[in-house]
Amino acid sequence: MSDIQVRRAGADDAESLVRLRGLMLAAMGNDIDGPWQATAVDWFAGQLASPDTFAAYVVEDPDAGVVAGAAGNVFVHPPGPNDPTTLRGHLYNVSTEPAFRRRGLARACVVALMDWFENETGVGQVELHATDYGIELYRDLGFIEAKYPSMKLRTARG
């Protein structure tokens, strides 16, 4: 796989995006067994049908199928002094099959997604949550650490 060919994911790629998400989540130490995958396939299929607010880019190997990808959403956000736009981007689901890592595939997918954010959406900034494994890629692409840490609170449904 010397010539990287990135393509925008289509309706038939929902299961591949979920498989890659599972790889990413497992690498982060999560137990990926359970019913979340069927829900995730439906979710990705729905997102793929909304090309103005969702995009995923993948690399496909002729023998192995989809081996790398990155996804992102556009969401409404109030403007502020550092970003007067009303849209933000969220980059996530960056993952590569272990046998295909260290070849620039994830980078190519992220760059394609960033081109989409820049040229086809109105987002003023793109946010992400970086793992230790991926943080250098994001820094190389110009991402900086946020001043305030990300926090979360699980509801009874989560």
Image: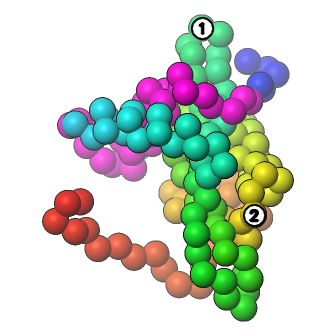
Residue 141 visible? The answer is no
Please name the amino acid that badge 2 sits on. Answer: Gly
Judging by the rendered image, the residue that carries numbered circle 2 is 122
31 sits to left or right of 127: left
Q: Is residue 93 above or below residue 86?
A: above
User: For the residues marked 1 and 2, what is the alpha-carbon distance in whole angstroms?
Assistant: 37 Å
Q: Earlier in the sequence, mark 1 or mark 2?
A: 1
Q: Is residue 113 above or below residue 97?
A: below
Q: What residue span does the magenta drawing correspond to?
A: 6-34
Q: Position of residue 107 (x, y in %)?
A: 71, 43
Please name the amino acid that badge 1 sits on. Answer: Asp
**As rendered, which of 122 and 58 lies closer to the eye?**
122
Q: Position of residue 50 (x, y in %)?
A: 58, 43
Q: Residue at x 52, y 62 (%)?
A: 129
Q: Quadrant of the C terminus?
A: bottom left
Q: Position of residue 62 (x, y in %)?
A: 65, 10
Q: Nearer the viewer, mark 1 or mark 2?
A: 2
Instruction: Give residue 145's quadrant in the image.
Output: bottom right
Q: Position of residue 104 (x, y in %)?
A: 72, 36
Residue 15 inside the magenta-drawn segment: yes
- SS for callout 2: loop
- SS for callout 1: loop
Judging by the rendered image, the residue that carries numbered circle 1 is 63
59 sits to left or right of 98: right
Q: Residue at x 68, y 58 (%)?
A: 138
Q: How many marks?
A: 2
